[in-house]
Amino acid sequence: MQITYHGHSCFKLKGEMGSVVTDPFDDKTVGIPLSRLNAEIVTISHDHDDHNAKDKVKGTSKRENPFIVDFGGEYEVGGISVFGTKTFHDQVNGAEKGPNIVFKFLIDGISICHLGDLAHQLDEKQLDAIGMIDVLFLPVGGPFSLMNDEAIKVANAISPSILIPMHYSDSSYPNDTKVKPLEQFLQSFGMSPEPEDKLIVEKDRLPEEMQLVVLRRS
């Protein structure tokens, strides 16, 4: 399976059976361009413009229009399994920012988890629903989602083989962005790996201990 990062919380997961795009965003809202993307499945963690621009993703030769998943539950599309667990975009059960869906995917035998704009620690029931994870996409730039030490606590609770940060700013973001830079999280984590253009994940070659991977924006 191949993973590429397209900024903010948007990734493309490409496996043998098909592809998934997570949380495509509106360019004007985020302040950076989103590259052209095609996929069979699009997941939307919550209905905010920086995560819900589903019309930005086109279909493929396998599927004319992507299958949109924006609710919790279990789905199977073209051999790819998707599981959605309800969480919140704040620390007061959604009273301020609303709900957030954590998505788990099974692609090529690999389990991937996208936390969306999760803003709180996961309880035991939520952790059980998420289960064992090989690759975790973790929001780290806040300010209305996880950041720094709180993000690290969630990562340790899930304990993936590979940890990939998302939802952070870089030099191409507008100066007035509220999202914090990646360097702030890396300082808290105590590690600063060299960024990679893409990541190829194979089930039988996963690291034994949690590995931090930073992906360049495509």
Image: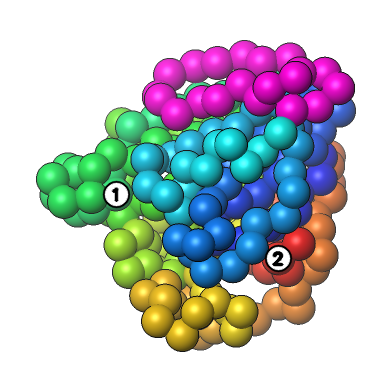
> As shown in the figure, which amino acid type bears the numbered disc 1?
His
Return the mark for residue 217. 2
Rendered-image quadrant of the C terminus = bottom right
In the rendering, at what x and y percent does residue 58 appear? Answer: 71, 34
Q: Dot 1 surroundings within 10 Å: few (below 14), some, or many (20 or more)?
A: many
Rendered-image quadrant of the N terminus = top right
In reply to whether residue 127 is colored magenta, the answer given is no
Q: In terms of secondary structure, what is the magenta stretch mainly?
A: loop
Q: Write down the residue under mark 1.
A: 89
Q: Is residue 160 left or right of residue 65?
A: left
What residue appears at the point 86 percent right and 22 percent down from the top-left corner? 61
What residue appears at the point 23 percent right and 50 percent down from the top-left corner? 97
Magenta residues, as a range? 59-79
What residue appears at the point 46 percent right and 85 percent down from the top-left corner? 175
In the rendering, at what x and y percent does residue 93 appear? Answer: 17, 43
Q: Is residue 218 left or right of residue 147?
A: right
Note whether residue 149 is visible: no
Q: CA distance from mark 2 to mark 1?
A: 24 Å
